Image (spheres, grey):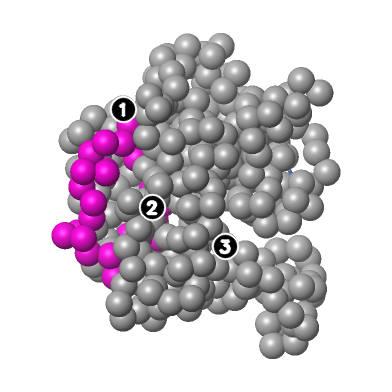
Amino acid sequence: SDKGLIVSFGEMLIDFVPTVSGVSLAEAPGFLKAPGGAPANVAIAVARLGGKASFVGKLGDDEFGHMLADILKQNSVSGDGILFDQGARTALAFVTLRADGEREFMFYRNPSADMLLKPEELNLDLIRSSKVFHYGSISLIVEPCRSAHLKAMEVAKGAGALLSYDPNLRLPLWPSADEARKQILSIWDKADIVKVSDVELEFLTGSNKVDDETAMELWRPNFTLLLVTLGEKGSRYYTKNFRGAVDAFHVNTVDTTGAGDSFVGALLCKIVENPTILEDEAKLREVLKFANACGAITTTKKGAIPALPTEADALALING
Ligand code: ADP
């Protein structure tokens, strides 16, 4: 196909989600296995919308790693960038569903296979063939995957890809909040497109106001697009020439996991189809409406991957 390739780089793992909420991990009567990891969700979001997607990352050569590789394949995501570590195991997260609806995570990462991705193991031809290269921050935490992350960004950029960054802040994974902020901001200005949630905006700026002035503190002169996602309040956009907000859709929300990844996947799909939307506010607003619809749909079902929409699903919501 002549569609531009979107390469998503970083972690893929399994969340063990208890079948009931409001109890401790030890008291949970059972768990469901929910595959996830933000970059992997984005890759599947792109493929489900009909885009061309590839995932680059390392899995354990174990039952869970092979399960995850199969899930990518079943969802039409190219596996050319998947590596299996012969020693370490696949990353896992054990989730507590608190009574107040929030989630707490305990990670198996000591170290997990994804953290052991080495720069020299990267499939550079694949990365060079990307039109958009998307990544999160988890791979910045430790070596050697940190060096692999920096190299992959450099190679993609050198080959002319647009770089897309979603920090996916998961504080418990970092040694400290200061370290997380420092590392995230250390690669901040290398991206072309950056998406943050309202929580990340506050964290990175140290402000308690989610407004244009705070968002502009995160703007860099080389950015083409900065996005702030606001859950049921929709999203805000900032470019060199215009800024604004696009309302969310009203849906029956049951689980917001993956909404941001669905939003990003939709946006990247449309940008790869037609990069000129970045210079045309009316077109960009249409695309963000589509991305908001994709995010909204993702909240209407449990889990991230099962809830990601097709283009027809999104158009059905938009056209009511
Ligand atoms: P993140 O996962 O990055 O925090 P959000 O939860 O803000 O991202 O979700 C991304 C987008 O998905 C939002 O901008 C919005 O358009 C849509 N969305 C998320 N939650 C809801 C919701 N409860 N109702 C409607 N749309 C939602």
**What is the CA distance from the residue labelled 3 to the residue labelled 1?**
37 Å
Q: Ligand 1 near label 1 (Cβ, under 8 Å)?
A: no
Region in magenta: 116-142
Q: Quickly name the residue at label 2.
A: 79
**Of callouts 3 and 1, the N-terminal one:** 3
Count of marks, rendered view: 3
Q: Tell me the kind of residue under disc 3.
A: Pro
Q: Secondary structure at mark 2?
A: strand
Q: Quickly name the residue at label 1.
A: 221
Q: Ligand 1 near label 3 (Cβ, under 8 Å)?
A: no
Q: Secondary structure at mark 1?
A: loop
Q: Give coordinates of residue 226: x percent, y percent.
A: 45, 32
Q: Is residue 20 above or below residue 186?
A: below
With 170 as the anchor, is 222 left or right in this view? Answer: left
Q: Give coordinates of residue 58: x percent, y percent.
A: 35, 64
Q: Is residue 291 above or below residue 167?
A: above
Q: Is residue 97 above or below residue 266?
A: below
Q: Is residue 113 above or below residue 164?
A: below
Which of pointers 3 and 1 indicates the residue nearer the eye? 3
The answer to if 144 sits in the magenta stretch is no
Q: Tell me the kind of residue under disc 1.
A: Pro
